[in-house]
Amino acid sequence: MYQPAIDLAAITAIDMHVHIEVDDHGHASLPEPLVAAVSKYFRTDGPRPAVEAVAQYYRERNMAAVVFTVDARTQLKHPPLSSADIARAAAEHADVLIPFGSVDPRTGEAALELATRLIEDEGVRGFKFHPTVQGFDPSQEQYAPLWALIERAGVPAVFHTGQTGIGAGTPGGYGLRLGLSNPMLLDPIAADFPDLQIIMAHPSVPWQDEALSVATHKHNTWIDLSGWSPKYFPAELVRYANSMLKHRVLFGTDYPLITPDRWLRDVAATDLKPEVLPGILKDNAARLLCLAR
């Protein structure tokens, strides 16, 4: 069972958004047409490392990483990677990795059972959801039992928000609905489950103002800065990260599609204040994940 063994003094950052896209048997997290489309969108055809390679990559950089997959078996009709296997592999690299689980909310009671097993048997430290790829509206009442379960477990939930490269350029965008990732759909969850810590992943283009509105009103919400080079961050996001949200903004990359090396290089060209970067890079995540003593 996973137990974190991260020496906060020895690391420079915690990457809150790292995808495991292939398992040790070569099975990919997405169907081949989507793998090709997202590579084209991000202009990368680089390797899709499994857990051990990800651990080594972050260990070399003196960083820790939150790792996860997305279980979209219903929407994509594609077998997901095993969150249990990811958690077990992360347990072997607990000095640098923090596993989050993923369940398909559309599987109903099965999702609740799997989430319980991932928490109690595997020790996952949070959950990842992608409403567009999973094809569900997170604000609908039918999913409330899942949010209640995660709230009781005391672990955070990260939700993709905004535009996605997954399906971009394919006929009909592969049938995926962008509107399901409007951050305003997370506001009812934050209202009804005030002890559930909700991470709104990515600059939420074209709904950045909505994300900032939710984050300033509901203090159980956070924003991670993954999926975009910092040089493209909306000005309002930078302004809020420098001020009223500086304690609830999190470093994230979307690795392997964006690397921490590129993120750190490009952030130097932004207006993010040097004094807020230590919190964004490490301290805020350490507090959220209960790693700080």
Image (cartoon, grey):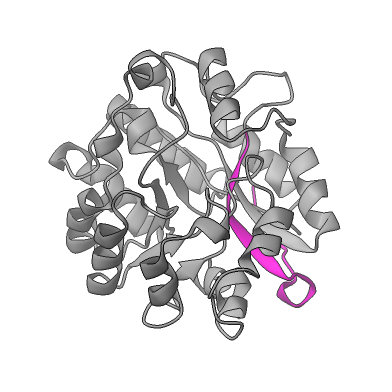
| Residues drawn in magenta | 1-20
From where the camera sits, is residue 200 visible?
A: yes
Residue at horizontal 59 percent and vertical 86 percent from the top: 275
Give percent across and percent down for residue 152. 34, 58
Seen at 45% across and 78% down, the residue is 246
Rendered-image quadrant of the C terminus: bottom right
Q: Quadrant of residue 105?
A: top left
Against 89, is 208 above or below?
Answer: below
Q: Residue at x 44, y 22 (%)?
A: 169
Residue 168 magenta: no
Measured along the vertical axis of the image, is residue 173 above or below residue 41?
A: above
What is the residue that sits farthest to the left in this orientation? 141
Instruction: Give yes or no for residue 17 being in the magenta stretch.
Output: yes
211 to 31, vertically: above or below: below
The answer to whether residue 74 is left or right of residue 3 is left
Give the mark count.
0
Q: Quadrant of residue 88?
A: top right
Residue 269 position in % (x across, y down): 62, 68
* Residue projecting furthest to the right: 60
x 57%, y 22%: residue: 35
Residue 3 is at least partly visible in this image: no
